[in-house]
Image: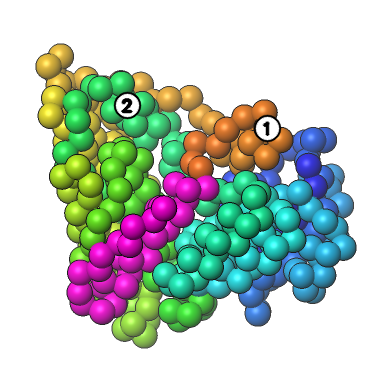
Amino acid sequence: MKIALIGASGHSGMLCIPQAFDPDRQYVGVAAGSAGESVQGTLARLRELGYAPAAYDDYRTMLRETKPDVVVVDNFYGEHAPVICDAFRAGCHVFAEKPVGATPAELDALYDAWRTAGTEFAAMLNYRYDGAFYRAWSLVQAGAIGRVRLLNGQKSYKFGTRPNFMTHRATYGGTLEWVGVHAIDWVLWFSGAQFESVSALQCAAEAANARCPETTALAQYRMTNGVMASVTVDYLNPQTAPVHGDDRIRAVGTAGVIEVRGGAVTLINQNGVQHPENAPAADMFADFLRQTQGTGQCRISGEESFAANYGAVYAQLAADEGRTVMFPLRG
């Protein structure tokens, strides 16, 4: 597989570069996707592993000259959409950092470009590959809590040291879009329902410029089949906390409750309180590559990737404008 990487501002290094040389992967090029972005660390890591990617000043030139099979998009979070569109127009499969688009109009254009390209697509919503979350989802699928009726998702990060591009909405996108999209995906994934409307709140009081990134946010969703969901997001996980991200989901069903908290699963149903073992580790990007070759399947489809990102973008819009936003019907 010929793989090209555009940008190095998010999780591409963690998810898309193997721990050791893989002869089935050919990394053909690396380029920045945003002005002022550095990709030198990515180039150095690939070369350490024994790959020989070319360095490009312009990713469009790279797409034309290397003709990659797969493009990984990971530039500044609020500027993904034009890059992804260019990759689709080049006929490439795309594995993209989230949010894949920062506005409804960007997502609509991306969706049309993807359908026209006919290639594979997945957003880097990697919690579907987390052992605890995948085990909990599998139990819900098996009927362990009956029909899902209510969900609460939480994403809490340590603020730490953040790059300058995150202090500007145009290059950041928004906290509901960058952080919240994970929990928004869990809500869709666990429930099997679709979003009908969302209202949301946000605050950037502790941010460097009191505007961005928003340090706290909350979204409330009405979903199909009478399902309700809430998602909370914050950058206030204490520096003394044992982990960077305090990630949780609680799903309430007609026959029980299941929760992921602290990297472990708790299930309560007619069999009492149980603590199922986590699922084995799995590699999201490897699965995506197999999907592009027709030999496997990624745990998140292109349609599901768009659904989660629409959920995040409409929540951001609801918070920005202080109103309830209705989701359009999609055919």
Give the residues in magenta.
302-331
The quarter of the picture where the N terminus appears is top right
Q: Quadrant of residue 186?
A: top left
Q: Residues within 10 Å of mark 2 (few under 14, many from 20)?
A: some
- Residue at the top extreme, as displayed: 271
Where is residue 261 shown, x and y percent of the image?
27, 39
Q: Looking at the picture, which amino acid does disc 2 mark?
A: Gln
Q: Residue at x 75, y 69 (%)?
A: 59
**Residue 326 located left or right of residue 279:** left
Q: Position of residue 71 (x, y in %)?
A: 69, 55
Report the residue that reaches farthest toward the bottom: 209
| Relative image position of residue 313 (x, y in whole percent) | 38, 66
Q: Is residue 258 above or below residue 180?
A: above
The overriding secondary structure of the stretch rendered in magenta is: helix
In the image, 202: left or right of 9? left
- Residue at the (31%, 21%) spot, across then down: 142
Residue that carries the numbered disc 2 in the rendered image: 141
Q: Is 46 above or below relative to 160?
A: above
Q: Secondary structure at mark 2?
A: helix
Residue at 12% x, 16% y: name it: 270
> In 3D space, how far apart are the residues under numbered discs 2 and 1 (Cα atoms)?
25 Å
Mark 1 lies on residue:
294
Q: Position of residue 201 (x, y in %)?
A: 21, 70
Please tell me which of labels 2 and 1 falls first in the chain.
2
Label 1: state its secondary structure. loop
Label 1 amino acid? Answer: Gly
Report the front residue among 139 and 272.
139
